[in-house]
Image (cartoon, rainbow, N blue to C red):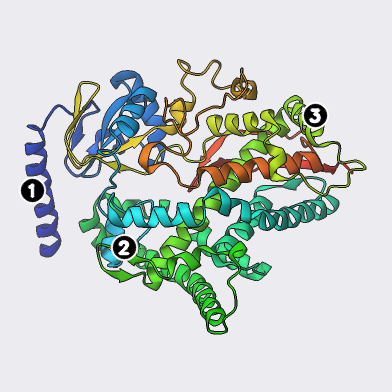
Amino acid sequence: MEVWFVIVVSLCISALVSSFFNLFKKNLPPGPSSLPLIGNLIWLRHPISELEFILRRLKTRYGPLMTMTIGSRKLIFVGSHSLAHRALIQHGSIFSDRPSPSATSKVLKRPRIVINTTPYGPTWRLLRRNLTHEILHPARVKSYSRSRQWVLSVLTSRLVDASKSESCVTLIGHFQYAMFCLLALMCFGEKLNETQIKEIESSQRGFLLSLRRFEVLHLWPRLGKILFRNRWKELLQVRLEEERVLIPLIRSRIQAKQQRICNHQEDDEAVRAYVDTLVDLQLPQENRKLADSDMVGLCSEFLNAGTDTTSTALQWIMANLVKYPHIQAKLYEEIVSAVGSPKGSQREMIEEEDAQKIPYLKAVVLEALRRHPPAHFLLPHRVTEDIELDGYVIPREATVNFMVADMGLDPKVWEDPMEFNPERFLPTSPGEAFDITGSREIKMMPFGAGRRICPGLTLALVHLEYFVANLIWNFEWIPVEGDEVDLTEKQEFTTVMKNPLRARITPRI
């Protein structure tokens, strides 16, 4: 009991002293009152999982720039398009850093090197440049077209089989499996069998879905190491399981590549894998090559960024097309006018180049990303120097986040924002296109904006447009009788449908 008492008293004194000095800090954005250790009093009545709903309510009182205290951390939230543009575009260099490694990474003593959380600097530039030039360059994306065709055939076959054996089909599992097939091929350079895909999917989704369970470990890390010892052990086991699955695949690809070099065989650039690009990278600040755990982190990031978010977005798109048959019919008509009817057609699928001829397809995808962005918040940013924003001072090293979903639903920017209306994205003049990057102005930012914008933006749009076009061209999607499509959201790693989409699928041929 004496040891516990000393620990708790020491932490309380430290927090009180820190809180006292915070009173003299510069003019922070407004926010609700807070107590040492506990943070905002609001957390006594609401769980952190309700953060988004709390912020929306507080926004009407404090405005689009707010300070929230969670545990011992102060976080600044931006809920305005113009402020987001000012921060991420006009002052991008100041807002492009990331917060220090999480408490869990420090305790595990091996924070992974991944692009999303690496601090702004030489290492981040190297990793991002490698990904964008070697894998996400338009020429490289085009080289994976056969991979997408293979995955589309896998997906359509599964849907046909499911529609024959079930009166209605639950879609999300099929979407996730297809995306894991595609991203695993791009990552490891080979078509994996179903057992391997399921193992990767299980380890990755297990890690993602467990993140919320470990959130409490970040609030009071010192005290939490004592109170939540079993949860720390559980986190370590989840991480070890991920390495158990991915490291053999990484080593297998490296060995195969070395074997081709030894045998003087030409490397097939058309199937260049992400792992291939990581082998010879030299970390500039540490003067070393990537370790196995680093490669696991980067491959895990690649898989998760391309599968969970894309399959989530794909489900939201198809849910709205099922819920609104007139939109689905209009999309099908425009696809047919561009490529012809599937009945009697010599082609087996719509090519990626065909999608460029269907403006309404792009409009449907953009409207779904506006209405249902897979991520309702960006990953946290950290500012590198004091800066004034909207009359308030954002202090150096402050953690800043951006309310993505709120920006897409702002009635000052979007007419009838709750309506699913793809027509709002149709170009009114030739050559006009919506700026999804936000470089000119930010109206919505499902992929972020500025220097930390998602590097896979173009690839994600290619995948969504390609799969949606083929799913609508090949099948008619019919609501389940007596089962209205429910667009209620639920927070997992991404924001998913609370009740996964079910539909009757009828092949058009």
Q: CA distance from mark 1 to mark 2?
A: 30 Å
Is residue 311 something that shows in the picture?
yes
Q: Quadrant of residue 263?
A: bottom right
Disc 3 is placed on an element classified as: helix
Bin the neighbour count of mark 1 within 10 Å (Cα to Cα): few under 14, some 14-19, many 20 and up.
few
Task: Please give the residue where the numbered disc 2 appears in the rendered image.
Answer: 111
Q: Quadrant of residue 201?
A: bottom right
Q: CA distance from mark 1 to mark 3?
A: 68 Å
Disc number placed over residue 418 in the picture, else none: none
The residue at 20%/58% (across/down) is 222
The residue at the far bottom in this view is 263
Marks 1 and 2 in Cβ contact (< 8 Å): no
Q: Which x, y percent locates residue 420?
A: 62, 25
Task: Please give the residue where the numbered disc 1 appears in the rendered image.
Answer: 13
Is residue 501 something that shows in the picture?
no
Q: Quadrant of the N terminus?
A: bottom left
Tell whether 199 sits left or right of 216: right
Q: Compare residues 473 and 378 and report the one nearer the observer.
A: 473
Amino acid type, residue under disc 3 in the picture: Glu
Task: Please give the residue where the numbered disc 3 appears in the rendered image.
Answer: 333
Q: Quadrant of the C terminus?
A: top right
The residue at 12%/30% (across/down) is 26
